[in-house]
Every structure is written in structure tokens, then in C-alpha cells.
Image (cartoon, helix red, strand yellow):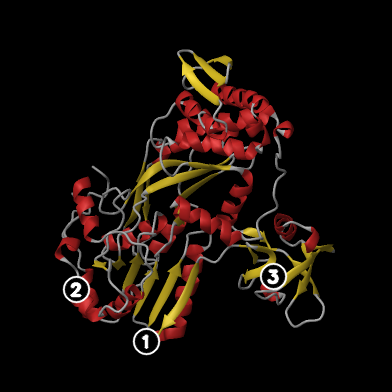
Amino acid sequence: MSAFTPKQNGAATAGHVPLLWSLAAALSIALSACGTAASPPSPQVASADKASAGDERRLFTETYESIIEYHIDAARADQVAIQSLAKIGDFDSTLVVERADNDVILRHGEESWTYPAPPPYDSAGWGSLTARILDTARRVSPALAEMSVDRLDEGVIDRGLATLDPFSHYARPDVAREWRAARDGFSGIGVMLDSGDGVRISSVMEDSPAAKAGIRINDRIVALDGVPSASLTPDQVRERLRGPASSVVQLGIQRAGLNKPMMLSIERAHLVPPSVTLSEDHDVAIFKIVSFNQQTGQTLVQLLHKAHQDLGLAMKGIVLDLRDNPGGLLDQSIDVASQFLDGGTVVTTIGRNPDSFQYFAAPADHHAETLPVAVLVNGGSASASEIVAAALQDSGRAVVIGTSSYGKGTVQTVLRTSNDGELTVTWAQLVPPRGYFLNHHGVVPTVCTANLGDNADAAAVLQKSPAPELIKSRDDLDDSGWTALRALCPAQRADRAIDLALARQMVENPALYGRLLKAPPTNLAHNFVH
């Protein structure tokens, strides 16, 4: 892991992960990459009458404690709590929570309940008060009473976090487990099920227990441990596929063309969703990185070795395709960038918490890759992928091709909550080697393909690139200067074939690559924001 080592806040934090990604895209990856093979679920609170008031008080207390300690901007427990409690009005318009001097009032029609307000920074006091108000609201509101405790708590906490920044959020336990599975791996057999047909296998992970057992796409699960799948809901099918590594699940598999189901005994294993793939196009190695999970750096090293073995001395260059990569783990982005840098800054992080001040550098004299490198980005490239692209661009190690990236240059710390959920709190900003804030600015390519069609003449585009405005020094740009720069190459989500065509031609042509690689004069000593 990275050098992030914040203090543990009593029971408030059961784990800490430096995380960077664009939330909407990351959620899609987290929920799809795990499929049916997440780690075993913890017992869930299904309704308010099963919830422990103490558990809910603890959740809100640790939430307010963590925000006060870690958030990049100073925050108060009372302000976050009042904003959070306003959410119940969205679920039931007859409920209103308001602050009146030293009191907090819950109103429901003609009824009202008044509670003394704790001191502004009293996390335990506001945690207890939040739980008390929600308990009262459930008793008088059928709409809230019908909601699961986990979903209500998620809505309330997310409302408060949304007032702080766009990327802080809370994940209830079942969602948090899927996120952890996407980042850290999971125990299962390595299949995904069709979301519209809970027993049809839509994909099989390479080298997984399912693949080794011969399971194929479009196979249908008809029984699990002797229980017919027809008697199970899709969620129950998924839960029965989960289990500890080395445990065994008995599957009945129906395959088209077979008269009767195959009965298979499959041993579950710990698996990490693949995040890097290699394709070889004549003399160019193309690495597609879709996210940054626990094995991204290691997998890239292995695939780099494979590419050199396959292509030998004919290998002329490398393409890192980071398009639509929403990010992931900070330490993995450092590992990936370091494969191409022989020493030097990768990124610096700064925030309000003293532990957020961190400097990350590539190791020197570690046999870094020396072949020409092109990096592809687009409007869906965010956070960890922007760290890699900016580090290689700023150091003069790679030419960036595509459109401006997303511009999410913040670090989120992930804190595991006492109920097995996750609280994700923005706590630092990212500073690339040249000393600008990555947030909102992002990575602006040297070779811009915004609005180019796939039939564009790659040679002609490269001959005209780079535009003079795109290679001017960016060290001292203010916000308006960055806005103007990004406008020259606006962020777009298209995944164009022309991007790859340009990258291949460039890395195969040493003279062209050298011309495009030349960076404008800059003071690299200013590698900290001034």
C-alpha cells in the first residue's frame, strides 16, 4: 500500500484505503466486476425493529468524527448532521428537521419534538441525536418505517456528505462489499450472471475456478448445493455462489445441446478482477488498463515481460490506453507510472490533515522501461489514471494523445465503518510533478483528437501536431488559463480508433516521437503548489 498512515480514530475507523476514482464510473465497475463472486456477506439489518439503536448511534458518531478529522475542508458535526437529517423530508414531505438556536426540532404535521443541540464539534452527541430523531421519524412515518435501516442511513449520510464535495460518499454494507471486491479481490468461482436472467452465465473470468471447471458463457445454473435455482431469487443465487476461499459449491449446469445437467464440484478461490490486458500489434505493445486495483501494477509488470518475450528486438514502442479508466488505488497508480520512470516525482498530495502531505517518487536505477510510450486519455480518464498520464507527460517520458481528461484530482480515504459499510471522505489534492493542481485541470493531451473522426489521416494529424498552444508552459497557468487550455481540447468520452492509430504511428517513428516529446521549458524545482 501507499505511505498513507492516518491515525485510527478509536472505533470510528476499521480500515483506511487511499482511493482515487470518478464515482459514477467506479460504481459501475465495482458492481459489475464482482458479479456473483463477492466475499461472504455479513448479517444485514433488514428492518427498523431489528436495528440496534446503539449500532446506529455508533455509525453516525464515527461518520461525524471521520469528517472532522479527515475531510480536506474544516467541517463541524452540527452542520453536517442538520444537512444529513434534511434528507428525511425527501422520503416523507410531512417531516421537517430544523435548527432553532440551541435546539433541534423535528416536525410532523401538527406534532413536534424538541431536542437540545449538542456542541458544534461533539460527534458523539450529534451521532446520538441523529439516531434518536430517525427513530422518532420511523415511528410516525410509514414511508420511513418501510425502508431498510441500511438504505435510510445511506440516504441520510450521503445527503450530508454531498454538501462537502462531489466525491465523498457512504456505501451501505452490501454495496461496500462489492466495492471492496473490485479493489481487493473476492472469494468465489469467477463468474458473472446476466442481470436480467439471474441464472445465465454472462462471463467467466480467465484462470478462475469456473474456467478451469469448463463453465462457459450462456451456461445456466439449475441447482446450487442441491437446491433448484428456480426456487431461489437472483440475489439468493448470487449469495450461494459466494463463500470462503477453498470451500466447495456443488453446481448443476445446463448447457445447450445436452440432455441433462452437468453436476460440478467447484472449489472457490480468492480472485482479483483483471484490470490490465495486452494486445500486440506487429511491433507495438498495447496495454489497456480499465481500473487500478490491488494487482494492477504487478499485472502490468508481468505483461510487459510477456510483450518483450513475444516481440523481442522488433518491439518499437508501448501504448498505455487509459481511456475511460475511472481510477482506483493510489499506490497502484504510483507503481504503474514508476515502470516508465527512472527516479523523479510521480505525484504529491496535500490536504488539511497532516498525514495527507505525502510525496511519491519513482525508484531510481530499477531497470525502468525505456521504449517510446504513448498514453491515451479521454473525458472518462480520472484520478489514478490522471496521475499516470500527468507524471509521464510532465517528466517528458510519454506523449499524451486524445482529449482532455476528467479532471478529478482529489484523494478519497476509505474508512470501513462498524456496520461493514464504507465511508469515503475527500482528504487531499493531487499535485503532478510540475506543481499545478490536477483537480478541475486534469491532463490536456499534446496530440488532441477532439472532434476527429476515425477516418482522419493519422499522418496528417501528426504532422500538424502539436498545436503551439498545447505545448506552452503550464506551470504558471491560473484557473482561467487552464479553462482556456482545456477548451482547446475539450473532454470527450468517445473511444476512437484514430487515437490508437496515432499512437502506433508515433511510437514507431523515433524522429516524430522525439519532436512530440519535447516539453516546454519549466522549473521542475517548483514541484509543490505555491
Badge 1: few (under 14), some or many (20 or more) residues near its Cα, within 10 Å? few
**Badge 3 or badge 2: first in the primary sequence:** 3
How far separated are the C-alphas under marks 1 and 2? 22 Å
For label 3, the residue is 209
Picture quadrant of residue 394: bottom left
Crowd band around label 2 with a 10 angstrom C-alpha radius: few (<14), some (14–19), many (20+): few
Q: Which disc number belongs to residue 357?
A: none
How much space separates mark 3 and mark 1, taking CA atoms?
36 Å
Hey, which quadrant is residue 209 in on the image? bottom right
Which three-letter amino acid code belongs to the residue tagged 3? Pro
Q: Is residue 112 left or right of residue 412?
A: right
Q: Residue at x 37, y 62 (%)?
A: 493
Q: Position of residue 453 (x, y in %)?
A: 30, 74
Question: Disc 1 designates what residue?
Answer: 314
Query: Is residue 401 placed above or below 62 in the rendered structure?
Result: below
The secondary structure type at the circle numbered 2 is: helix
Chain-order first, disc 3 or disc 1: 3
Q: What kind of element bears circle 1?
A: helix
Mark 1 residue type: Ala
Q: Which residue position is annotated with label 2?
A: 515
User: How far apart are the two marked residues, 3 and 2, measured between alpha carbons?
Assistant: 49 Å
Of callouts 1 and 2, the N-terminal one: 1
Q: Amino acid at mark 2?
A: Arg
Question: Vertically, is 142 above or below 431?
Answer: above
Quarter containing the C terminus: top left
Q: Is residue 281 left or right of residue 344?
A: right
Instruction: Return the x and y of residue 65 as percentages of the image width and height.
Output: 51, 30
